[in-house]
Image (cartoon, rainbow, N blue to C red):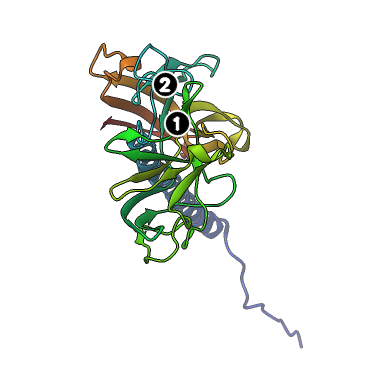
Amino acid sequence: MNIKYFNSKKGFTLIELLIAGTIGLFILTAVYYLYSGSLHLFSNVKSISDNVQTKIPSMELIGRYIDRWGVGVYSTGSGSNCTTYPPSNAKCVTKTAQTGLGSGITCDELIFWGNLYGTGFVHNVSGGTATMTSCRLSSTTGQNCYYLWRTNTIQNDIISGAPDILYMSNLSTNNADCSTFSSTGNITTSATLTSWTGTTSYDKTLQAGDVIQRAPHKIRLYCASNSNDSNRNWLYVDLTDTASYCNSNETSSAIAPVDSFQVTLLPSGCTASSGGCSAIEVNATFRSQSKKYDNTYDTHQVRRVFGR
């Protein structure tokens, strides 16, 4: 007897394999293009979003600095000095075109003076105690440098062409956030601001209506390469103390990546040294920190005019 065994299992035919492979190829191609499109969209949106999140607060910060232009600044009232302190006019401003920043980079350096920290208004003086509204007045060493203004006239003694700096002691609340002090021991037992020279004749007795302002800083906006961003161009600010006995300097703080930062003093043809310039036009091109899908950066141009 001959017994035959038949295998009921059959493999795929060549045609079936080709069809399956073709279908799989279509699916992989679709997945690739879907992923590539999603990555393309994500990269571009992220680059644009990063730039928007950078430029809005950066312009507000630039505006905050320019808003302090000329505030609390003592000036000689004559001459044409805008490069050293004290300037010939409180609203002196210097604009200089920068060079050596690389191909296609156009930036201006902007320098002016302004009060950044500390203002107080005296309500009354009674029994040797001054009651005042204080916005960040400080007796901290290195920041305790003040001008005293009365009816828009500086009360500090002018020594060698510059105001003698006054300091405060016995401040009941240090660095208060726009608060009115109580009527106990705010300044000194004699309600005076004392000269750094230590000469008692330079002490100034406070009166109701007096304004106390922190001595100003030199504010410098400029472009420079950033080593933390592959030496690409960024906008920076330097804040340098102009007062003796104070060292509250804030140098080389990066603000934002830019391709350009151009400044125009207004009105056109104004004389900066005489205070004739009443506005600053800023035209900046901000650059994203993250790249788009095509390996380029998103840029956004912003133009704003700040008046004083």
Q: Is 249 above or below relative to 187?
A: above
* Along the line of sight, the residue nearer the viewer: 268 or 50: 268
Q: Quadrant of residue 63?
A: top left
* Along the line of sight, the residue nearer the viewer: 114 or 32: 114
Reading the image, the residue beneath label 1 is: 157
| Marks 1 and 2, how far apart at CA | 17 Å
Q: Which quadrant is the N terminus positioned in?
A: bottom right
Mark 2: which secondary structure? loop
Q: Is 72 above or below relative to 46?
A: above
- Residue 222 position, x and y percent, is 48, 26
Residue at position x 57%, y 56% in the image:
14
Residue at position x 51%, y 56% in the image:
24
Mark 1: which secondary structure? loop
- Three-letter amino acid code of the residue under disc 1: Asp
Pick out the residue farthest to the bottom: 1
Q: Is 206 above or below relative to 197?
A: below
- Residue 22 position, x and y percent, is 49, 52
Reading the image, the residue beneath label 2 is: 87
- Residue 4 position, x and y percent, is 71, 81
Q: Nearer the viewer, mark 1 or mark 2?
A: 1
Residue 219 relative to residue 281: left or right: right
| Residue 33 seen in the figure | no
Residue 271 relative to residue 36: left or right: left
Q: How many marks?
A: 2
